[in-house]
Amino acid sequence: MPFEITRPIETLRAQAIARINAKAGEIITARLPQYKQANLTARAVELNHRATDLWTPEERAEWAAIQAEWEWIQSIRANSNAAVDNVNAAVSPSQIRTAEHDFIGKEKK
């Protein structure tokens, strides 16, 4: 877009980073809304208050599911952090757009 040429590159960076962070949050909350995240955290705390050797097979499975969800969240965050790093390393508006698009286009789920 031609009008981007007149905007300071720092403004473009800040806008792209805000969109990347918003998209990461959107992806995470689409799968795990805040209430589900809070419930998973609360359940993890409950399980952590008991010795793991006292856990039932169902509780072990529950713990594994909680861990899997957390690892998924961490992967989205790692990808968005990498995109932000790429935006910060960009030296032109087109590189900023590419770095942003690479994350937003890739992270559909």
Image: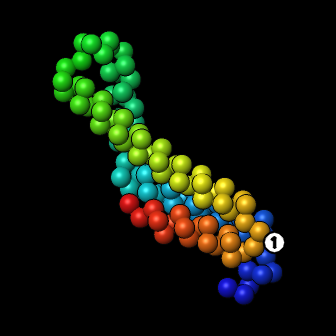
- What residue is pinned by disc 1? 8
Where residue 95 sits, quadrant-wise, is bottom right
Q: Is residue 83 visible?
A: yes
Q: Give me the residue at 30% from left, 33% from top.
A: 64
44 to 31, vertically: above or below: above
Q: Is residue 18 left or right of residue 46?
A: right
* Percent of width and height locating residue 17: 64, 60
**Is 66 situated above or below 29?**
above
Locate the N terminus by quadrant.
bottom right
Residue at far left of view: 57
Farthest residue toward the bottom? 2
79 is higher (above) or lower (below) than 108: above
State the image coordinates of residue 42 (x, y, percent, origin top left): 37, 28
> What is the three-letter code of the residue carrying label 1?
Pro
Question: Which element type, helix, strand or loop, lies under badge 1?
Answer: loop
Query: Image check: 105 left or right of 45?
Result: right
Question: Which quadrant holds residue 8?
Answer: bottom right
Residue sitting at x 43%, y 57% = 27
In this view, the residue in front, 76 or 14, is 76
In the picture, measured across the screen, residue 92 lies left or right of residue 82, that is right
Residue at point 47% right, 65% down? 106
Quadrant where the C terminus is found in the figure: bottom left
At which x and y percent is residue 104? 51, 66
Q: Quadrant of residue 92?
A: bottom right
